Amino acid sequence: MPEGLTEPEITAYNIAKAKTDDEESKRIQAESEEITTMAKRKGYRLMMYGSNFLNNTGLQIKFSYNAGEVERIVQPVFKNSTLIGMALPDMGSDVPMGHHLLTAEITLNGQQYSNFGKQVLYNQVDPALTDAELAKMDEDEAKNQKKGGKKK
């Protein structure tokens, strides 16, 4: 908080800060919900919010399919102590085509992983699809997301 403010200025500052914090919290919540409701393909960029992230070589994210049957580890991009970014890895041919929930866990030392159970809806697609076919699939999924459920 800036120094030398009057009592009314301090009150206004605190109200504005609370509103900004609330808006940021709502944005993060919306992004968290979207991650499990809209399927993502390999290469999709994700942001992970948390606390006490360290910018070191041990910082890794492990994506797991079917309780660890298939695992991929990625090196995220350190943004700051509360935000890291990464791209969804290719989960390989052992994951069947379609939508699947992947579990994402984090490690700061490359050995001990978290046990938060954060999930990402992953869309395994046929690797033979062309860019045009993938773009059409993305458009169709976006249209279906906007439609919502049937009205009674």
Image (spheres, helix red, strand yellow):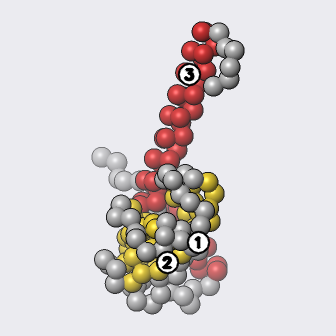
Kind of residue at badge 2: Ile
Residue 38 on image: x %, y %? 46, 62
Q: Find the distance from the CA under tag 2 to the CA under tag 1.
A: 13 Å
Question: Circle 1 — which element?
Answer: loop
- Given residues 33 and 107, the one toward you in this image is 107
Residue at point 45% right, 90% down?
Answer: 93
**Residue 122, above or below 93:** above
Q: Find the distance from the CA under tag 3 to the CA under tag 1.
A: 38 Å
Question: Circle 3 — which element?
Answer: helix
- Given residues 146 and 8, the one toward you in this image is 8
**Corner quadrant of residue 105:** bottom left
Residue 29 on image: x %, y %? 45, 47
**Corner quadrant of residue 7:** top right
Residue 149 on image: x %, y %? 36, 53
What mark, if any, has residue 73 been given in the picture?
Answer: 2
Residue 44 on image: x %, y %? 57, 69
Kind of residue at badge 1: Thr
Residue at point 55% right, 63% down?
Answer: 46
**Corner quadrant of residue 86:** bottom right
Name the residue carrying label 3.
Answer: 14
Name the residue carrying label 1.
Answer: 57
Q: Which residue is most to the top?
A: 7
Kind of residue at badge 3: Asn
